Image: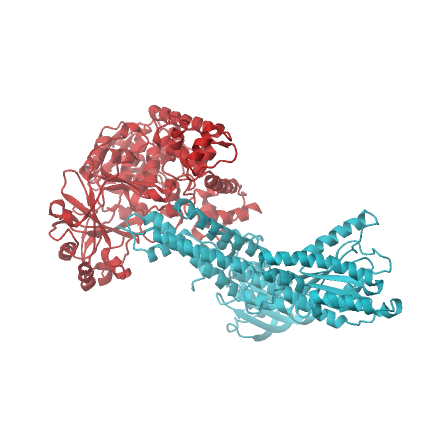
Chain colours: A red, B cyan
Amino acid sequence: MGLTFLHLLNSVSFYKKKGKTFSFKKKGLCSPQMSAEPYFDVVVIGGGHAGIESALASAKRGTKTLLITLNLDKIGWQPCNPSIGGPAKSTLVHEIDALGGGMGKIADRTFLHKRILNKSKGPAVWALRVQTDKKEYAEENKKMLDNFPNLTIQEGMVSDILIDKNFKLNGIKTYFGGIIRCKAAILTTGTFLGGTIWIGSKKISAGRAGEMASVGLTQTLRNLEFKTSRLKTGTPPRIDSRFINLKKIEKQKSDETENWFSFDRLEWNSRKVMDCFLTHTTSATFSLIRKNLHLSPKYGGFMKSTGPRYCPSIEDKIVRFFDKKEHQIFLEPEGRILNEIYIQGMSTGLPENLQTEIIKTIPGLENSRMVRPAYSVDYDYIFASQLDKNLMSKIEGLFFAGQICGTTGYEEAGAQGLLAGLNASLFCEEKNMVCLSREGSFIGNLIDDLCTKPLKEPYRVLTSRSEFRLLLRSDNADFRLTPLGRKYGLINEREWKKFKKKIERIENESKRLNKTFIKVNSKILKILESEGQNIIKKESSLAKLIGRPNFDYFQLNNLELQNTTLNNEEIQRLEIEIKYLNYIERQELQIKNVDKILDTKIKKNMNFMKISQLSKEGREKLTKRRPNDLREASKIGGISASDIQTLFLFARQ
Amino acid sequence: ASGRGGRNLHAARPCRALNKYVGGGGGMDETVFALSTPPGRGGVSVIRLSGPEAGGALCRMTKRSLPPARQAAVCSIYHPVGGSLIDRGMVLWFPSPKSFTGEDVAELHVHGSSAVVRAVIEALGGIEGLRPAQPGEFTRRALLNGKMDLVEAEGLGDLLSAGTEMQRKLALRQMGGHASQLYDAWRTKLVRSLAHVEAFIDFGEDEEIHEEVLSGVIEEARGLARELRSFCDDARCGEIVREGVHIVLAGPPNAGKSSLLNAIAKRPAAITSATPGTTRDVLEVRMDLFGLEVAVSDTAGLRIATGDDIEKEGITRAAEQWSQADVRVLVLDAAAGVEQVREAKDVLLREIQDWISAESLSGREQGLGATGCTMVLLNKSDLLLTTCGETAPLQAMVEELRLWLGDVGVHMVSCVNGQGMEEAMQSLHTAARHRLGGRDLENAVVITRPRHRQHLEGCANALDRFCAVGNAPDVAAEELREAVAHLAAVTGKVHVEQVLDVLFADFCVGK
């Protein structure tokens, strides 16, 4: 049984500081500055999902942390669908939780509808998705930050980053003249940096509807010669739940199953659930959009940037998939006491008046009232290949996380935020920073993709992006990451004890299953055979038995061979490991092979500039950084897996 | 740039498969040169340069500006340092990217004298930034610059070493990209299948991507596995043409197998003597048999070994060769009398019965193929009249053999006076062609390398496993990914972005 995922964990050892160049004296973590300017070790700029995880991770380690955001009332706001999880995204949330993050816990506290997706597609891709109450979600986040030790929150618009002559960050400046000194800062500006929102051909400067954009930082980043560009995303309209004709639409009930994001049972909070609804577009929707296509930004030709392919506008769907008679429309509540309904499947760039009419063509929504129009937003992001895989940029102490790195989604943002927060804190302590490998976690996979692949659209995690999908599951996220979290102070004593006990129980049970044999001609065998399908010709362990496709752990109950000390979650995990043993071993072997390659040393005099198979950028970075081995090289931003293969060929000579 | 140029190549680089090509080291920023015609005396020798400095070097060698692209120019060639005249010749200039390597390429056509060539090579070596090319470096650069893919590069290698007409045609087709087209078509199909499975997993819940998608993919995978298998079921004829048809001469000692080998090869390749058991090891001679490369093996005479261990080992090896041969030639001593022929007939009869039973098991073709690839040569026909006198029983035996092996399968020959040799050679050629299954190798795409076969079979096996576990999409997808990886090992890497491109083109996914 391969229960040892610890070898997948990967910490970096080469980001050693070359001697102290800090301008201030080190007196523990909270050393005050000589000047009167306020001082924090880490400043997190932005209070979205990346910012929250950054602040938590940093503060949890005892680092004096400040979170500064444009609007304190909007911390943890869900501007699009107030939904957490889904395929691959749920794995990210479990991983964040396994590293002591907050997202899963808050989602478990505030959900109002939950479903297990992909139930029939095999346990490796099962995915929890919950609809949260967006007001509660934001409030819970704010509460959590408010009461967190070592963490201060403050309102303000950061407009400049202060650096010393060695290109090391030493402070930030706000629009209205505030100066805060710090050793590290994490930029998590989301859609706010130079944000512009669009409806039809009209646009206005804003980060989200009704909220001002952040100005000034864009120029700072340009001055520091960061390569930036624009990305676009959008959100569909909201309608009033009281004007929906429920008789004409299909009800979608919340799943009854006990599934949670957090591995911490204390967070599990069973509560009353709400229904979602399903309806569809009609031929009237189709012809109305067709007729007015020229009014949409894309087909009217007044907005060039294209949005993400997995989030097409309704006009895009109708143009590109014209032979599809109807498209599904999901109606999802946004809160318990909120009358707002999110219309999933109705993203549009069409003008406001048309949006109202289009909604009315949908069965059940004939009398609906639109309370918020759909809009698009485009904003500045930086090419993440300028970051190392610890999310620090070329400016020492300046980290980036979330949508500014080119992603979309709360989960993707939170995942990066957590790592950036951890590394910013480690940076302040002059300790080695952490990179997560792409074969060890979806967080690692996400960051590796961002730092090495060209971006065509906002990046969303997909299970298909991982070469190791059968290993990177939701159920084993804690096994893969909690020991790392513990090592870096993100997991407290209680959580750690609980985790160790869980491992112990599963390992003992695994031993028992492998050592308990069913003998030929035994009574148990007779029972099994009398049940039909399970013909056993030779002595077989219980593990082997469970490995059969038509047998599951719970059938042991009938034979009185079960173990009552395990809970369902643990049983499930064990069962997956047994049933997938062959595949898991196959993928672990692949990882071992990759790992061996990474140990290859690079000669001191290797001339990277002559390896023309590498990108120009990659050659320059390698020349500047001079990694000692391929493992170090693989952490550098812009160095992809295929670059490593190439380097391997040259290093071996 | 075209779809294959520049950075695109970087993305589509078939990393794993490139190992052997990137062995040489050294970057492509350097300019390399090499003599591209065989060394030694000849009419013309061509020295080729490739890389960014090729143009500059050409100017310095000719003391003139670059000639028009791709047009021959006659000029004097000088030593760039001393300025002395080396030779008068012709030069060609191929600016990037329209050149063999995709880089700037220059060619110096000089008189085919080793002194001239040496002088030019020395002169080029003296120019800064130039270095001699490593073996295969021009092709390697062409490959890395996307001028050809791996299969085409292998085709070029085969063409350069083609010794026979058949090999030339086969290599030319492969280099021309016909094989690549076929492989690419499969790859496209597979990537599409994978995209559909990934779509089902990642977007199935929201976007009405139902089980039908999966069953469609399983259907497709089944078809593809079948197609791959039937493509692989080609009796290895492409590899045989490339490696040479293996013909084994076997028979009792002193039947004249070695003499026959020498007669076929038209040179004394094997030692012959009147002493039985002269040949102890297997001796192989490669030759062009009417446009087909064949490797003829002479083996130790088969008998209940009375000799030493060396002869015993020789006999073991002979038996091994016999069992692996593409074409089997049983050589008998016609003058040794009817007994030997009858014994041989019994042996063959047993084998043929095995073939026939195998035939009923695994289809006609194999059995028929095996009989069509076996010949009997009755050697020493010149001695027949003098020693035996009575030839009627022998004739009867020959007729009987012909019942199984066909008229072309049995010949009376003499290595001494050449009697029947011409007909026997023709029959040998027919048998060799027969071994290739009578396939139209000049117009078909066939597998030419075991490496390709191994991956194509690996792909088919993974597809079978995919179909078997199709109802569990998470593991099924792994099998499909493996199938793609196998095909990609032949044609070049498949990136997840390519899969996603298909996914988003084929499905209306997203909120």
Up-down: is B469 above or below B97? Answer: above
Residue B144 visible in the picture: no
On the image, the x and y values in percent for residue B430 come to 67, 69
Q: Is residue A420 left or right of residue A621?
A: left
A522 or B189, which lies in front?
Answer: A522
Up-down: is B440 above or below B303? Answer: below
The part of the image, by quadrant, that contains residue A17 is: top left
For the image, the number of numbered tags is 0
Up-down: is B124 above or below A85? Answer: below
- Tell me the residue at 57%/67% (across/down): B172
The part of the image, by quadrant, that contains residue B136 is: bottom right
Q: Is residue A573 left or right of residue A598?
A: left
What residue occupies the far right of the structure in this picture? B386
A163 or A148, which lies in front?
Answer: A148
Up-down: is A90 above or below B177? Answer: above
On the image, the x and y values in percent for residue A226 come to 34, 48
- Tell me the residue at 82%/65% (across/down): B334
On the image, the x and y values in percent for residue A603 come to 54, 43
Residue B457 visible in the picture: yes
The part of the image, by quadrant, that contains residue A490 is: top left
On the image, the x and y values in percent for residue A514 come to 48, 30
B27 or A181, which lies in front?
Answer: B27
Q: Is residue A187 left or right of residue A337?
A: right
